Amino acid sequence: GAGVSQSPSNKVTEKGKDVELRCDPISGHTALYWYRQSLGQGLEFLIYFQGNSAPDKSGLPSDRFSAERTGGSVSTLTIQRTQQEDSAVYLCASSYTGAGESAQYFGPGTRLTVL
Amino acid sequence: GESVGLHLPTLSVQEGDNSIINCAYSNSASDYFIWYKQESGKGPQFIIDIRSNMDKRQGQRVTVLLNKTVKHLSLQIAATQPGDSAVYFCADKRYNFNKFYFGSGTKLNVKP
């Protein structure tokens, strides 16, 4: 079946602009995660959605970052007034149930470059 | 601080040999662990997971060992193949928390 998809695959933007990154999770997966990966680094947790529960936003680095998940499926990560330090690969993952109960499956990521 | 770390940043092995990738964690409340493989330009790919009530779990050519006494996790790859060349991450989740903590990764180079 189809895996997690993300769009765009690459995004180049100018400092100060807003960007939106999209994630389509695997159908039927109730949990969705966003991570950020800087070059040669591990993954930094950003936000977690589980069903209709309030999202866990504890990993968002600043109030310029926000995310929503509509209809329990597609999610959008928005970065306002982008800064050069926001440049990274943004990865989305979904899992069948909540954290710790099943493995996460990752999308290919969106490479964001802020000039 | 509380983190998942890796002993070796790079591991080179000969094709056909067995590989062992190690990971240390510091939080005794960690109850679920996952190993991921990440190839260049791709998202992490799930390899195998293990819960804290287990010591060992086997998959196809891979085995994960968990030693809770010393807070150590290892991934063993049997008969390593060129296609196994990638960066391997371990990740852990703490009990009653939603997020996973990832190490910085070990790069596995398989020499033909």
Image (cartoon, helix red, strand yellow):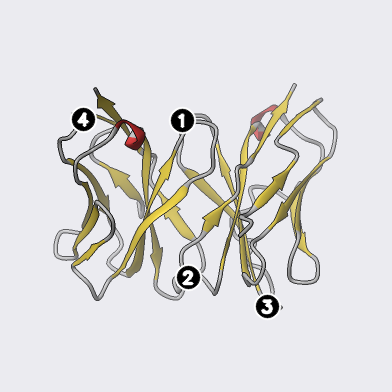
Q: Which residue is mark 4?
A: B15
Q: Which residue is mark 3?
A: A53
Classify mark 3: residues with Cα within 10 Å, few (<14), some (14-19) or many (20+): few
* Amino acid tagged 3: Ser
Classify mark 4: residues with Cα within 10 Å, few (<14), some (14-19) or many (20+): some
Residue extending furthest toward the front: A1
- Closer to the eye: label 1 or 2: 1
**Residue B17, percent from left and from top:** 15, 35
Q: CA distance from mark 2 to mark 3?
A: 14 Å
A106 sits left or right of A77 in the view:
left
Q: CA distance from mark 1 to mark 2?
A: 26 Å
Q: Secondary structure at mark 4?
A: loop
| Residue found 39% across the figure and 73% down from its top | B95
Q: Which residue is mark 2?
A: B97
Q: Output the chain of dot 1.
A: A
Q: Which residue is mark 1?
A: A40
Q: Output the chain of dot 2.
A: B
Q: CA distance from mark 3 to mark 4?
A: 47 Å
